[in-house]
Image (cartoon, helix red, strand yellow):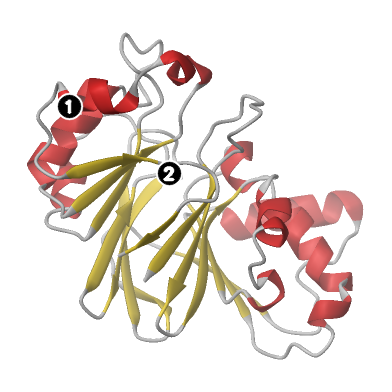
């Protein structure tokens, strides 16, 4: 698998970091992890096959993670690039996903779910395995952020990864990520976080030590990270593996 970071930032406008989205190339297709409003432009900018995207995972319904889904569906409905498409687009997320899409649809009369190809919306249950792409196994775990928020574990043959999306501190996340090839977890704040339902560096590093992945990536950076020497502050925690900083456009092989 190859993971491309489309957005390593938050809802706060930033000149270098757009909001949450990650493109995953797997053995049997492509998967978008979160669909922020900026994800649409980023996919095109990086030359990714947005018209042929196979599946979308929505971690939760905050706009910097979900707000690009309706515009994406509106775009592919009318784009010349999807005129010959016949394969379905699969969208996965927590309870309430389909109702939310339909409410947006009704508000504008967009008929987002009526396309030249099928749109299949699946609401997953925590800790129940499902096939997110052909032969690619996934399992979601509820996280302390919103009622609908989930982390996801993905396995494609021997390659494994976990994507937490937004979360507060919960040691069970380390269990989900135990020994994975890449552990992608939010690290919104450096220290003294102002809210409980995100992570700061010490908490993220604790989860990494407990999970012992082969490699970890910190992401979802608020602007306070701009003045921080990432390598220096991470090294102070004596990480058990390589810990890298997400950056828009970064590609990582898993």
Residue at (13%, 54%) from the top-left corner?
178
Residue 70 left/right relative to 187: right
Secondary element under disc 2, as helix, strand or loop, is loop
Residue 230 left/right relative to 205: right
Q: Position of residue 248 (x, y in %)?
A: 54, 44
Q: Position of residue 192 (x, y in %)?
A: 32, 8
**Quarter of the image holding residue 165?**
top left
Residue at (36%, 35%) from the top-left corner?
167
Q: Give the answer, above or below, for where 236 lies relative to 181.
A: above
Q: Which residue carries the number 2 mark?
A: 149
Ranked by sequence position, the earlier of labels 2 and 1 is: 2
Can the viewer see residue 171 in this picture?
A: no
Q: Is residue 196 or residue 232 the one in the foreground? A: 232
Q: Give the answer, above or below, for where 168 lies relative to 83.
A: above
Residue at (88%, 61%) from the top-left corner?
110
Can the viewer see residue 77 in this picture?
A: yes
Q: Give the answer, above or below, for where 71 lies relative to 17.
A: below
Secondary element under disc 1, as helix, strand or loop, is helix
Q: Quadrant of the N terminus?
A: bottom left
Q: Which residue carries the number 1 mark?
A: 235
Q: Nearer the viewer, mark 2 or mark 1?
A: 1
Spatial distance from mark 2 to mark 1, Cα to Cα? Answer: 30 Å
């Amino acid at each position: 698998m190859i993971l491309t970071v489309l957005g390593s930032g938050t809802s706060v406008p930033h000149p270098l970091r757009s909001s949450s989205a990650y493109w995953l190339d797997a053995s049997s297709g492509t998967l978008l992890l979160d669909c922020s409003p900026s994800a649409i432009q980023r996919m095109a900018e990086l030359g990714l096959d947005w018209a042929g995207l196979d599946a979308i995972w929505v971690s939760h319904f905050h706009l910097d993670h979900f707000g690009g889904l309706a515009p994406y569906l509106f775009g592919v409905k009318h784009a010349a690039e999807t005129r010959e498409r016949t394969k379905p687009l699969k969208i996965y997320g927590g309870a309430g996903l389909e109702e939310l899409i339909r409410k947006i649809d009704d508000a504008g009369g967009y008929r987002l779910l009526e396309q030249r190809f099928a749109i299949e919306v699946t609401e997953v249950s925590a800790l129940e395995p499902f096939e997110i792409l052909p032969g690619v196994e996934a399992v979601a775990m509820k996280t302390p952020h919103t009622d609908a928020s989930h982390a996801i574990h993905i396995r494609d043959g021997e390659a494994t990864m976990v994507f937490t999306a937004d979360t507060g501190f919960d040691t069970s996340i380390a269990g989900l990520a135990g020994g994975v090839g890449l552990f992608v977890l939010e690290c919104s704040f450096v220290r003294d976080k102002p809210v409980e339902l995100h992570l700061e560096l010490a908490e993220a590093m604790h989860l990494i030590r407990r999970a012992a992945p082969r490699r970890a990536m910190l992401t979802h950076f608020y602007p306070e990270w701009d003045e921080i020497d990432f390598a220096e502050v991470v090294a102070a925690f004596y990480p058990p593996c390589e810990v890298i900083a997400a950056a828009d456009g970064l590609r990582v092989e898993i």
